[in-house]
């Protein structure tokens, strides 16, 4: 009797996980054209293996933001200014799970964004200066590649 009442709940949880994974996968595909959602999608994708109802609500909030900003676009017109400029920033130990820092960067060619990134640093830093150094190193590698 106890097994029968537990089984439908387990099936329901598996279905919610499948819906969440599908939604996050679509958001990951979409954030390549929408830089404003890159960080939020990165956060919800961290919980893809064990999502809760809070994570599903957060993913749905991202969808609401996308629907509300459908008319926002990046327009690229002809320009003679081909100067590559990069900006980078990081925070110190912002992640509550493992105290790793998050760094972000954007590169513009003239006045048009051509590359951007926001991600958790691979190792935990012992100071804010070390965090900034790791972010600058990653940005320099990206600038050399561009």
Image (cartoon, grey):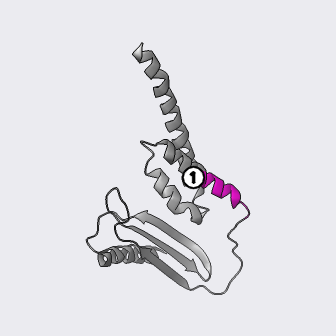
Q: In the image, which residues are magenta?
A: 61-71
Residue lying at 47% horizontally and 73% vertically, measured from the top left: 105
Residue lying at 54% horizontally and 53% vertically, measured from the top left: 28
Give the class, few, some or many, for how many residues have Cα within 10 Å of label 1's Cα (few <14, many ≥20). many
SS majority, magenta: helix
Q: Position of residue 142 (x, y in %)?
A: 44, 73
10 sits to left or right of 68: left
Determine which residue is flagged by label 1.
27
Is 145 one of the magenta-colored residues?
no
Which residue is at the front of the view, 108 or 2? 2
102 sits to left or right of 69: left
The image quadrant that residue 133 belongs to is bottom left
Q: Position of residue 33 (x, y in %)?
A: 61, 62
Is the N terminus in the top left, top right, bottom left or bottom right quadrant? top left
Which residue is at the front of the view, 122 or 66? 66
Element at label 1: helix
Residue lying at 31% horizontally and 79% vertically, measured from the top left: 129
Residue lying at 71% horizontally and 60% vertically, measured from the top left: 70
Give the residue furthest to the left.
126
Q: Position of residue 141 (x, y in %)?
A: 40, 74
């Amino acid at each position: 009797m106890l097994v029968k009442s537990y089984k439908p709940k387990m099936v329901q949880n598996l279905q919610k996980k499948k819906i969440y994974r599908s939604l996050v996968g679509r958001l990951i595909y979409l954030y390549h054209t929408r830089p404003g959602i890159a960080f939020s999608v990165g956060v919800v994708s961290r919980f893809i293996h064990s999502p809760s109802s809070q994570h599903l609500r957060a993913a749905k909030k991202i969808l609401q933001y996308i629907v509300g900003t459908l008319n926002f676009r990046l327009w690229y017109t002809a320009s003679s200014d081909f100067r590559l400029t990069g900006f980078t920033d990081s925070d110190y130990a912002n992640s509550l799970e493992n105290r790793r820092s998050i760094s972000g960067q954007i590169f513009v060619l003239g006045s048009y964004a051509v590359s951007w990134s926001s991600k958790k640093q691979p190792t935990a830093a012992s100071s804010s200066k070390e965090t900034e150094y790791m972010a600058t190193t990653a940005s320099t590698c990206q600038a050399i590649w561009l």
